[in-house]
Image (cartoon, coloured by chain):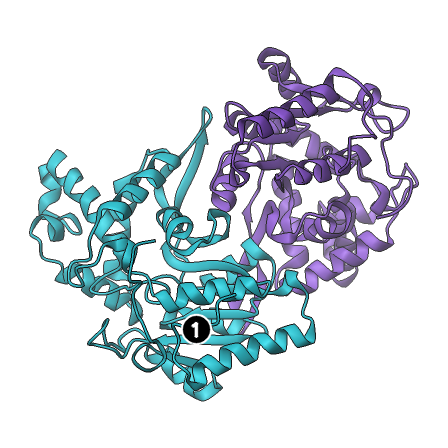
Chain colours: A purple, B cyan
Amino acid sequence: MSELELWRDTDTRAAITDFVARVEAQGIPAAERVAVFDNDGTLWTEKPMPIQLQFIFGLWAKLAAADPALASQQPYKAVVDKDFGWLSAAVDKHYAGDDSDLKTLLAGVVRASAGQEVEAYTESARAFLDAGTHPSLGLPFTRCVFAPMVELLRYLEAHGFATYIASGGDRDFMRPAGDQLYGIPRERVIGSSLGLSYADGAVTYASAMGFLDDGPEKPVRIWSRIGRKPLLVGGNSNGDVPMFEFAREDALRLLVHHDDAEREFAYDAGAEDALKAAAAKGWTTVSVRDDWDTVFPATES
Amino acid sequence: MSELELWRDTDTRAAITDFVARVEAQGIPAAERVAVFDNDGTLWTEKPMPIQLQFIFGLWAKLAAADPALASQQPYKAVVDKDFGWLSAAVDKHYAGDDSDLKTLLAGVVRASAGQEVEAYTESARAFLDAGTHPSLGLPFTRCVFAPMVELLRYLEAHGFATYIASGGDRDFMRPAGDQLYGIPRERVIGSSLGLSYADGAVTYASAMGFLDDGPEKPVRIWSRIGRKPLLVGGNSNGDVPMFEFAREDALRLLVHHDDAEREFAYDAGAEDALKAAAAKGWTTVSVRDDWDTVFPATES
């Protein structure tokens, strides 16, 4: 059993091991040991922009090449011009409560996969992950995960927890990462969904968004998929606050705080409300700088 | 390990055991051993009408008592007048492709739980199951399950399969039955969903239907929840045909045929297309009369 060796000997580490000791001592049934984690910024890095977006860029470039009229429209224009400011601003505006550009972005996400069969899409996501490299860290995507969090997943499983991902990222994009990088099987990956339709033996993406699994949608999706309130939640942004509120009263709430510009990134944007709530309600803040001995794994998964 | 003792020594039983032996011999990975079953008419009896409807009746009677104007409107009127013909006709019309009365019925289902917290609803469903008795069989609801099918669930699990329910019935109503009667945990129950909303730490039912998990919606929900095509599917009606088509090419497809008026019920209504497809495509038909040594369990779960 892992003893959280990648975590420094801090109050945060003690909060985790004390919590798990209490769960064991109280004999909380295995079925109730549900641990739910956000993905982007919680299990792997989300800067300078979510890795999924970098996957979508390739799809948009293909669309714009096939239909040059798209090259002058957002979100395709951003990729054609290699001007990513519009895209990261769209995500930042979403976290600040303005979804106007996010809607344009999501319409592009929907268009990029409409009509494609779900299994083919998942395979192309897997190929992208296997081949790609982070633009500023220089690491392969498969090493952009937070090694202490992966260690925490195994530690929790060793104590009878079932681990889930509940993230704003696209469920079908995250499933290969879940399998390969986190050891979380695809039936335990909860995320946003493109609309789906069925015909002639195949499920394909429809021409509409399904739902965006962020903010108040996270508790709804957790209930739909698991049917229980989590006993442990991990997140890093404002969009995780409702999931933290929805967790059991006796739950452990872990908020990852990105405060390490040297080893990863330092930013509070998009996490202001979550950090305030953590301070006010006594949620456990995980400092990347102080609590983690290592950030990224030394070798690929 | 159960050896399917409740199944007679027929070709059907051999088809099941031969299939499982092939899965083992081929070494199909455990993660791919996904078995998905319909519920009403497949794992428990659905006649004279689905057990969930009998639960809803109690809720409608309360609504009509609180608001007498409802007593003259369907679907509440049917319960007040104890005239269940309209209701079973609504379900029969649905299976025949006409959803006009089903929409009225579903509006009543939505109204019966709107604003209620999800956990309270699940507990009331559990209490209903524990207390109720089937109107014509005289069995407690907890004995209305098909004992050979429950035995089959355990047999499959003993061979490394994960078992799921994918049924038109309401997911949150079925979850207590899944736990208690089938040994299928709530995270593996896929079903129809009332709309949900989140506020102030609680998930409650909204004033709109979510989706009806029947027909072409079943493959969509199976993909969303599991992320794989099933290796075994079990069903009994036209609404299961898309799920049967969506299963892997090498899947075992089990269609329960209700042909035993003496021990259960005999009917083909709502299963005409499924029976035709089974004959045309070589799906395995399970005869209640010929293949099952016992229909209902001798004692309560």
Q: Residue at x 50, y 52 (%)?
A: B188
B186 up-or-down from B247: above or below = above
Q: Position of residue B237 (x, y in %)?
A: 36, 72
Q: Which residue occupies the extreme top position in the image?
A: A280
Q: Is residue A122 left or right of residue A260?
A: left
Q: Secondary structure at mark 1?
A: helix
Residue A81 at x, y percent in the picture: 83, 45
Determine whether A289 is above or below B80 in the image: above
Q: In percent of the image, x 44 and y 53: which residue is there?
A: B183
Nearer-the-camera pick, A57 or A28: A28
Residue B298's x, y, as percent?
A: 28, 62
Q: Is residue A84 left or right of residue B169?
A: right
What's the residue type where badge 1 is placed? Val
> How many badges with numbers are in the image?
1
Q: Residue at x 60, y 16 (%)?
A: A277
Determine whether, in the image, residue A101 is placed left or right of residue A177.
left
The answer to whether residue A64 is seen in the rendering is no
Q: Residue at x 69, y 38 (%)?
A: A39
Q: The N terminus of chain A is located in which quarter?
A: top right
Q: Does residue A173 appear to the left or right of B176 in the view shown? A: right
Q: Position of residue B161 (x, y in %)?
A: 57, 63
- Name the residue that disc number 1 marks: B241
Density class for disc 1 (Cα within 10 Å; few <14, some 14-19, many ≥20) is: many
Q: Residue furthest left?
A: B81
Q: Work out whether A200 lies above or below A152.
A: below
The answer to whether residue A42 is visible is yes
Q: Which residue is the extreme one toward the bottom?
A: B280
Chain letter of mark 1 equals B
Q: Nearer the viewer, residue A62 or A252?
A: A252
The quadrant where residue A62 appears: bottom right
